[in-house]
Image (cartoon, rainbow, N blue to C red):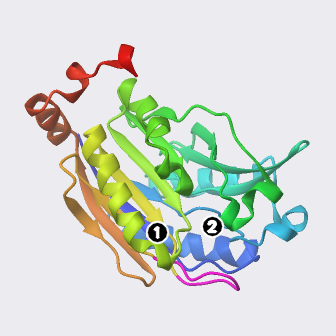
């Protein structure tokens, strides 16, 4: 099994869901023209970090965004890891990621567990409690959102269940680009999995974002990496490669979980 993955490294229009859906649709068309089989959007792609206006621009139960992703998946015949959005609930807003298969079925939902105080998330968002493990196109996968990658014990959980890919969606700032690249490679190496990380480009009124979306193989080798600007970052995921590496260095057989 192989996937051709396209990470949509888009510049998000601050606080403008209508424009961002139009932009995302154009990127989906581009990904289809490149014959991508899996397409990934960045974190909070429909609103950006306009957190103060979430009651006005957020998405009630994510309904409109789910419909949009379903339509695009069925139209183009690819799987979508739908970045994340501000999902409105009766208890407040969550930073929520949806995964839709090529038939338009929602196969996974995850709300960000670790809220970053540096971006004031804790003031406007509630932490999620969802499972990160899911199946996509017959393959065991996992999903995380931005700040999550600083918590390796959280990312290890779905790997123990058999996940072979790790999707990360983000709005990671340029001043911590070295951390982004180092943490992602470390997560790939220690978990012997592919890391597919989609970051936004551009800037808002408070931050400039790093871009540098990455697809990293289980050795920690960079398969594909973007620059700082808008682009579709494309790379191949080869599941046979994962099995080969895991057989060479049997990390999971040598774990001693009873000691930690």
Q: Position of residue 75 (x, y in %)?
A: 52, 57
Question: On the image, which quarter does residue 68 sit in?
Answer: bottom right
Relative to the observer, which residue lies in front, 6 or 90?
Answer: 90
Q: Is residue 205 above or below residue 189?
A: below
Residue visible at 30% across and 38% down in the picture: 191
Return the residue at label 2. Answer: 45
Q: Position of residue 206 (x, y in %)?
A: 68, 82
Query: Horizontally, is 95 left or right of 209 in the view?
Result: right
Magenta span: predominant SS is loop
Mark 2–mark 1 CB contact (< 8 Å): yes
Residue visible at 12% across and 32% down in the picture: 249
Tell me the SS state at disc 1: strand
Q: Is residue 44 above or below residue 248?
A: below
Relative to the observer, which residue lies in front, 143 or 117?
Answer: 117
Query: Horizontally, is 31 left or right of 44 in the view?
Result: left
Q: Position of residue 162 (x, y in %)?
A: 35, 26
Taking the magenta stretch, the answer to whether it contains residue 93 is no
**How many numbered circles does the render carry?**
2
Badge 1 local density, few (<14 within 10 Å), some, or many (20+)? Answer: many
Query: Horizontally, is 254 left or right of 141 in the view?
Result: left
**Disc ID at residue 8:** 1
Residue visible at 13% across and 37% down in the picture: 245
Region rendered in magenta: 202-210
| Residue 74, visible in the rendered structure | no
Tell me the SS state at disc 2: loop
Q: Is residue 162 above or below residue 60?
A: above
């Amino acid at each position: 099994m192989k996937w051709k993955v396209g990470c949509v490294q888009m510049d998000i229009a601050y606080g403008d869901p209508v424009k961002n859906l139009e932009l995302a649709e154009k990127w989906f068309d581009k990904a289809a023209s490149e014959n991508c089989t899996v397409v990934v959007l960045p974190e909070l792609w429909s609103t950006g970090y306009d957190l103060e206006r979430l009651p006005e621009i957020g998405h009630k139960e994510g309904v409109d965004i789910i419909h949009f992703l379903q339509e695009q998946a069925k139209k183009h015949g690819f799987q979508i890891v739908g970045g994340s959005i501000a999902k409105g609930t009766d208890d407040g807003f969550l930073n929520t990621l949806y995964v839709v298969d090529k038939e338009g079925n929602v196969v996974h939902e995850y709300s960000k567990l670790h809220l970053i105080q540096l971006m004031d998330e804790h003031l406007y968002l509630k932490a999620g409690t969802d499972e990160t493990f899911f199946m996509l196109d017959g393959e065991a996968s996992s999903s995380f959102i931005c700040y999550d990658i600083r918590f390796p014990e959280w990312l290890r959980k779905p790997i123990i269940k058999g996940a072979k890919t790790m999707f990360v969606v983000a709005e990671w700032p340029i001043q911590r680009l070295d951390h982004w690249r180092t943490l992602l490679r470390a997560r790939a190496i220690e978990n012997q999995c592919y890391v597919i990380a989609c970051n936004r480009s551009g800037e808002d009124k408070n931050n400039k974002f790093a871009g540098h979306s990455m697809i990293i193989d289980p050795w920690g080798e960079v398969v594909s990496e973007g620059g700082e600007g808008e682009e579709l970052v494309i790379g191949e995921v080869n599941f046979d490669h994962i099995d080969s590496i895991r057989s060479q260095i049997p990390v999971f057989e040598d774990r001693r979980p009873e000691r930690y």
